Structure formats: structure tokens, C-alpha cells
Image (spheres, grey):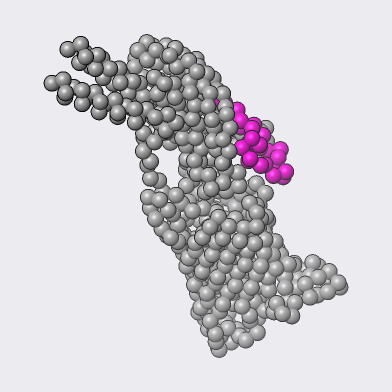
Amino acid sequence: MKKSLILTLLLFTFWSLNAQKYFTKEGKVNFDSSTGIEKIAAVNTKATSVVDFASGAIEWGVLVKAFKFEKALMQEHFNENYMESNKYPKATFKGKIDNAASIKLDKDGTYNVVVKGTLDMHGVAKPVTANATFVVKGGAISATSKIKVLLADYNVTIPSVVKESISKEVTISIAADYSVFK
Amino acid sequence: MKKILLAFVFASSMFTMASAQEGDLLSLLGEEETTDYANAAFKTNRVINLHSLENTAAGVFDFKISHRFGFINGGIQELFGLDASTIRIGGDYGITNRLMVGFGRSSFEKTYDVFAKYKLLRQSSGKKNMPITAAVFASAAVKTTPFADQERENYFSSRLYYTWQVILGRKFSEGFSLQLSPTVVHRNLTATKAEKNDVYAIAGAGRIKLSKRIALNAEYIYVLPDQIASRYRNSLSLGFDIETGGHVFQLHFTNSTSMIEKGFITETVGNWLDGDIHFGFNVSRVFTFKSYEHE
């Protein structure tokens, strides 16, 4: 009897672990490399992300072609000349929430955490650290974060003729409303 | 009972372990197949003189200035043709991502032209698979120079020219695109009775990307025999596209003087072998008026 009790407990532990996975398929990724001369910004509303609050693992994935610009030509150049989206169709982030245990999924609140991981885009994988905010409200979980990356770090080169119009540093901001993964 | 429970625990723990494997959380969501449309088979909506299979995007105005200098065989006296020039000033506008319209005015024979181009099929892969892009093109041109024979009765309709074209093309790879355009040019009035009012031709064009921002383009238009006067030749053009942000500069060599279909298809007089070659350029500058979802 004792044995089966332990096993049942074990079962519930696994269950609850599983229930700590959350996901979205409509994550928002904003991208901005504007300068005073030109507004260069795009949004991707089809980012996918999964968080496992038990282990702290978090992953993001976007299709580079799904970034929408206001200007069609900018979008074409973004794909053709800068991100080479035919060659590198996806960008991903795989990381870990430093203090995932501090996020209480059953308690409303705003939790500021540090996420460390690897950003893989344009064929280059580099470690990044980001400050992220998780908000738990009535069982709903959302997250936001913002990082800055240097284009040169990811082998994205800016030709000299447009050097003045494109910022060397790109701001990437993300936002997601997570749902329980079943 | 115990056994069942044990089996259940075992199965569920196996499942949890499998799904909790690190670094592969995203694969839990599975892949959603999307349609991937080929774009930028050419840098702009023209190859050189010919319309390419690309359109001006919805809400975008593309201001075009095209220039052809004189024949380079004019020698130093004519500064290799640079002393003379013909020009077309025009503009293209994308009404939707599939439909564009345009107009222009050429100094050569003082001609005004309007056109429309519609993409029937768009090359795509993934969820929707389409091997080629197909577009239809129609243009009308009116020549406004005085009639050659002022004595006889002249009609306005005699000044009109029409062109119909089907553009079939494919972006084979990032660096290589090819297109074929069966064409009919209709002239309401021809110089002699022997010349046909309807002229059938087939145009071929291609581009090879030399770098991300520079491409080599070529186009050749074969006019089927016994339709136009023997002094007219097939149009052959070679050129480079150089793209710098909002501009595309097209620099090229061509034996055609006119920059509109009825001219470069049916009235090209230059002979490449004799050095009847124009140096020329097209400059394209885009202005975004409205922003849409662009595929």
C-alpha cells in the first residue's frame, strides 16, 4: 500500500511538472533599427514560444519572412540583403530563466527575472542576457522583454551608402500571452 | 490494481521525460506549414526595356527616369553618343500587390504611354506550391509628332499602338531568374502595306545576381519573320542593376532607342555588330504612400 502511495505521489509530481509548461503561437516580436533619418521597424506577430516553469527553460522561434514592414521595399531588402531569409529562414532563442522558482504561478504579481541563453539568427549563435518581466494575473501569464543586439555580431553588414540610415544596434522587444500547454 | 497503477506511473513518467527534454521545447508545438512566396526575382519591375515579372507593391509609387544616349559609334566627335539623348519620364503605382498601373512620356516621337500589369500566378512553395509566376500586361501608346503626310486625311486613331504580353517566369535560385514573354504589338497604321498591323514576338530575359546589391541583366526580343520592314532588328540589351536602399540604378547597353514596347520591339534600328549601341540608364525611386501587408 505504501508503495502505491509513493507511486501515486510521484505520478502527481510528474503531472504538475507537465502542467507548468506554457506556450504561445502568437508571440509578438518587434524589431527596430531606426535612426533619425529613417524609420526602420517591423513586427512579427506569429512568434512561437514555450516556457517550462519547472525547469526554467524558455524558447522562442520566429520565421524571418513573417516580419512585416510599413514599406514593401524595406521588407524586401530586409529579407534579401540583410537577413538572407531564404538561407536562414528561422531565428531562435533558447535559454533559461535564472530564478524561475521565484515566479509563483498561483499568485498574482509582477516578477522580474533574468534570462540567459543563446540567440541564433542569420546563421550565428551568440549568448545573450535579458531582463524579462512575467506578469501573473488571475491564472493568465504574460511576458515582456527587450534586448539590444549589434548587427555586426550576427554578420549582418550595412553597406556604406546607407550607413547613416540604419542603426548598428537593433532593439528587439518581445511580448507574449502564454496559455497552458496540455 | 498495483500492477495497473505501476504501469500507469511508468508510462506517464516516460512521457514526461520524453517531452521535458531540454532544448527542444519548441518542437512540442509542431511545425505549421506556411506558403512561401518567391520575391525579388528582379530588382525592379523592368529588366531593361522589358517589363519583368515583378510588380510595384501596393501603395508604392515608383518614379522612373530612363535615358538613352546616342550610338557609341558616333566617336569622339559625339563623345561616344553622350551628346545626344532621349528620355522617358514616368511613374508606376501598385494598386494591389498583384495589380500595377503606369504612365510615361517619351521624347522619342513625343509618345505618351499607359499600361497595366496583373499577376495571375505567384511562384510559391510550402503549403501552396506554384512553380512559376505569370502576369499579363497591356499598354497603349499615342505618338504626337506631326503626321508624315499632311496632305491626306489623317485620323487620331492612326497615332495609336497597343501591346499585349504574357510574362512567364521563375526565380530558379537566389541568384538566377528567367522569364519568357510572348508578345503582340498592334499598330493601327503602318508605314507600308507590306508591314503587318499585328506583330508577334517572343521576348526572353534573365538576371544573374553578382552580389547582394548588383545584378547582371540581359534581354532579347525575337520578332517572328516577315512582319516588319527589313531595316528593323531584334532588340538586344545587357545591363547592370545597382540597388542602394530606395533607389535602383540600371545601367545598360542596348541597340533600341525607344523605351516603350511598340518602339523597342518593332522599331529597333541599331545593329550591335556595327556599334549602334546606346549607353543608357533607368533610375527608379520608390515612395510609399500607403502601407499594406506585404507578402
Does residue B33 show up? yes
Magenta part of the chain: A146-170
* Residue B232: % across, % down: 63, 81
* Along the viewing direction, whichever of B285 and B194 lies nearer the viewer: B285
Residue drawn at the location 86% of the way across and 72% of the way down: B76
| Residue at the limit of the structure toward the right, as seen here | B77
Task: Reply yes or no: does residue A121 show up in magenta.
Answer: no
Specify the quadrant that holds the N terminus of chain B: top left
Residue at 54% x, 32% y: name it.
A119
The x and y percentages for residue B83 are 81, 67
- Position of A145 compared to B253: left or right? left
Residue drawn where x is 16% and y is 24% of the image: B4
Q: Is residue A152 magenta?
A: yes
**Can you tell which quarter of the image residue A146 is in?**
top right
Q: Position of residue B251 (x, y in %)?
A: 70, 61
Near-viewer residue (A29 or B230): A29
Quadrant of res A101:
top left
- Using the rendered image of the protein, determine whether residue B248 is visible from the camera's viewpoint: no
Q: Is residue B93 above or below residue B30?
A: below
